[in-house]
Image (spheres, helix red, strand yellow):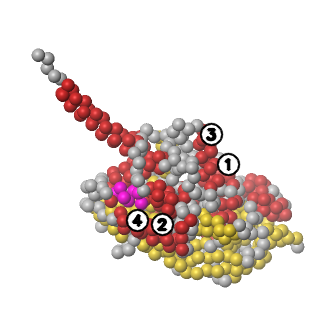
Amino acid sequence: MTKNVFPAFSWLMSGLITILFLISCQSNQNSGNEPFSNSYQQLVETLSSPEFEGRAPTTRGGRKTVAFIEEEFKRIGLLPANGDSYRQPVPLVEVTGENISPLVLSKAGEELSFSYPEEMIVGSSVLQDRIDLQESELVFAGYGIVAPEYGWNDYKNIDVTGKTVIVLVNDPGYELKDSTLFTGFAMTYYGRWGYKYAEAARQGAAAVLIVHETDPASYGWEVVRNSWSGPQYQVGGDGNGPEVLVKGWIQKSTAEQLFEKAGYTLQDLKTMALEAGFQPFSLEMTASVSFDQYYSQAECYNVAGYVKGSEYPDETILFMAHWDHLGKVEGPEGTAIYHGAVDNATGVASIIALAEKFAAMDPPPQRSVVFLAVTAEESGLIGSAYYAENPLFPLEKTVGGINIDAVNVYGPTHDLNVVGYNASQMQDYLEQYATEQNRVLKPESHPERGAFYRSDHFPLMRKGVPMLYAGSGRDYVDKDEAFAEWAEQDLRSRYHRPTDVITEHWVWEGIDENLWLYFKIGQELSTSRDWPRWREGSEFQPIREATEEMRSER
């Protein structure tokens, strides 16, 4: 009699299939193939819709955005981070310049006149009804940088009190591509426009004009025009430090004309500014410009909620993204809405989707996980800077954080670009889970653009908190280099323009891939006793060490 082996074989095969299925699911989760969120796409569509009017702070669209994020946090079950409120008030002043005169540059009775906003952009952070700069001596101050650690001082041996300084964009390392000068091709904080305005103010200047060039600025004149015209925002109250009366940009062609009138070429002055013995000097010209200014106090909000840790609730992991964009502009052809789909509806949708995952963790995280949507990033990292100065959770007990700004929408990649490559041990966690997805880490593609200093992680880093800011690279799965170049150009062509909308080219799977990475990093940190540190020699390392001492004292 033959023994029937089929039931046993069937049972064995069934078990094997189940095991393979579970392994496959785990593999898919690790590789990012499994969708991270069923609601992510709808969140981006909603936040970038005309209904939200471009999400400018203090506007109806901004208020709608704050309310929407707040309701999402409530729906998920996050606890309010500011007492019984999800909102952290950020006092803002909205400033709008109108009736802007031409910029008039005079030399020996002859004048050059440049119009707003095509040839120059000007504004002011000084709160007065009329801004009137008249016949202010024009001084060329190189890159406008004072950096003792690099042995650099563009203001040596000159008094610019009451004068107008004209400075070059970026920093000297970019121009020479010299790794021994500043940080070489990678922009430092000294290359950022915010630093140049602040340094000119510290030197007592009345005005500062930055010469715009597309490559060293990393964006075209249209971005300057769109970002700096219309209402501008700044933190209200005292303590903002000195301000110049007028801060602005001038087109490269404008600079070439004024330098020619002074007897130089733009290249002449670039060469002089890079010489070791450079001395700032008067161009023997004067600058005049005036405009009316309207300003009003307004209260805007960061929105914050958290999942409370079960074992160490006072230790926090931070996920953050900015919710604001440029709003809408009325023009001769109608209303132009700056939808901000990539920048940064994708980031806000990301922290909401991540919050949903962490709120559903069973068992819950041992450390608290905080989700922070900040305001007024486009006006100079205002919301994140305010949080850094007024944290809702102690920064010395903030384990680390991830900033999500402008998510990749062009599809899965074999690589990830890390902004501030190898700056802290946060990168070690990223590498671990990227390896599980068969992906490799690479330094950012364009360090000359200064992304390490121009998104919301920066104010937290300045307080010593290790922050991670990474995004998909350009090695797209099943795509060639031509596609990568097209994707980069498509993104740049939409940046800070009304065309930053969802298009048929978006591939949502690449977003899922990165969200799994961020979740796994946060999951590990929230269930461990690790405290990531800055790498040896980092400018932020001493600050973190000081907070470690504070933490041990508590």
| Distance CA(mark 4)–CA(mark 3) | 39 Å
Tell me the crowding category of disc 4: few under 14, some 14 to 19, or many 20 or more residues within 10 angstroms, Cα based: some
Residue that lies at the very extreme toward the top in this rendered image: 1
Residue type indicated by callout 4: Glu
Where in the figure is residue 433, as x and y percent of width and height?
39, 44
Answer with mark 1 or mark 2, whichever residue precedes in sequence. 1
Can you tell which quarter of the image residue 337 is in? bottom right
Residue type indicated by callout 3: Ala
Residue type indicated by callout 2: Val
Answer with mark 1 or mark 4, whichever residue precedes in sequence. 4
Q: Secondary structure at mark 4?
A: helix
Residue type indicated by callout 1: Leu
Q: Nearer the viewer, mark 2 or mark 4?
A: 4
Label 4: which residue?
72
Indicate whether 458 appears above or below 86. above
Magenta stretch in the rendered image: 352-358
Answer with mark 2 or mark 3, whichever residue precedes in sequence. 2
Answer with mark 2 or mark 4, whichever residue precedes in sequence. 4
What residue is at 45 percent from the left and 68 percent from the top?
68
Between 236 and 223, which is closer to the camera in this rendering? Answer: 223
Q: Nearer the viewer, mark 3 or mark 1?
A: 3
Label 2: which residue?
374
Answer with mark 4 or mark 3, whichever residue precedes in sequence. 4
